Image (cartoon, rainbow, N blue to C red):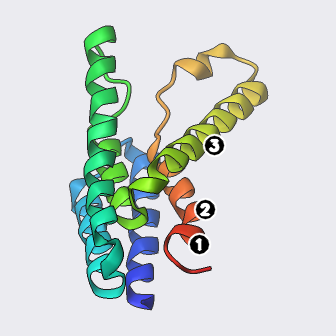
Amino acid sequence: MLIFLSIYLVLNVILIRCDMRSGLLPDRFTCPLLWAGLLWHCVLHPPFLASAVIGAIAGYAGFALIYWGYRFMRHQEGLGYGDIKFLAALGAWHGWQSLPMLVFLAALLAGCAVVTKTCLSRRLQVLKNPLPFGPFLAAAGLLMGYHTMGLG
């Protein structure tokens, strides 16, 4: 169990660092995170494997719909494809039932960060800068992990 949780934590930290530095969430880290989540359920929680598979599919499909809808309406990206794959990976770890709360919590954390940054800089230009969403997804996943991964 400790090996899986270490993989989860290390890959999340790497993804946070990548997104903060470059605005990218590389497949070489999101894909292993997804497969490790499915393997976690396969080996340690077989009754929840279906929930994990549905979580990966729903996470990917949900954010892909938002991505393409926003791109169609605004003719620009509102979120990167790495975020879509990252949510799919988190869905594999936490299951489909956790996705709405996970996304809500990530959005809430991101909103608080934007408000804080805007208040501290006192310039509205901050609102026009791209905001890496991966760190907030990771934080939400880590906060929810205690409950959803059977650690409690």
- Which quadrant of the rendered structure holds the N terminus? bottom left
Q: Position of residue 117 (x, y in %)?
A: 69, 32
Q: Residue at x 28, y 56 (%)?
A: 54
Q: Could you tell me the amino acid type at mark 2?
A: Leu
Between marks 1 and 3 in the image, the one whose residue lies nearer the viewer? 1
Q: Are marks 3 and 2 in contact (CB under 8 Å)?
A: no
Instruction: Give the image location of residue 4, x and y in percent.
Output: 38, 82
The kind of secondary structure element at disc 2 is: helix
Front position in the image: 128 or 39:
39
Give whichever of 72, 128 is nearer the camera.
72
Closer to the camera in the image, 130 or 149: 149
Residues marked 2 and 1 touching at CB (< 8 Å): yes
Q: Which residue is mark 2?
A: 143
In the rendered view, would you say 18 is above or below 34? above
Residue bearing the label numbered 3: 109
Whether residue 29 sits left or right of residue 16 in the image: it is left
- Residue reaching furthest to the bottom: 2
Q: Residue 7 appears in which quarter of the rendering?
A: bottom left
Is mark 1 in CB contact (under 8 Å) with mark 3? Answer: no
Q: Where on the picture, by quarter, is residue 14?
A: bottom left
Quote the CA–CA distance across marks 1 and 3.
18 Å
Decide which of tag 3 and tag 2 comes sooner along the chain. Answer: 3
| In the image, residue 143 above or below residue 121 | below
Q: In this figure, which residue is indicated by the disc labeled 1? A: 146
Q: Earlier in the sequence, mark 1 or mark 3?
A: 3
Q: Quadrant of the C terminus?
A: bottom right
Using the rendered view, name the quadrant where residue 72 is placed. Answer: top left
Give the crowd class for mark 3: few <14, some 14-19, many >=20 residues within 10 Å.
Answer: some
Marking on residue 108:
none
Label 1 neighbourhood size at 10 Å, few (<14), some (14-19), many (20+)? few
Q: Give the x, y percent position of residue 135.
A: 50, 50
Q: How far apart are the alpha carbons under marks 3 and 2?
A: 11 Å
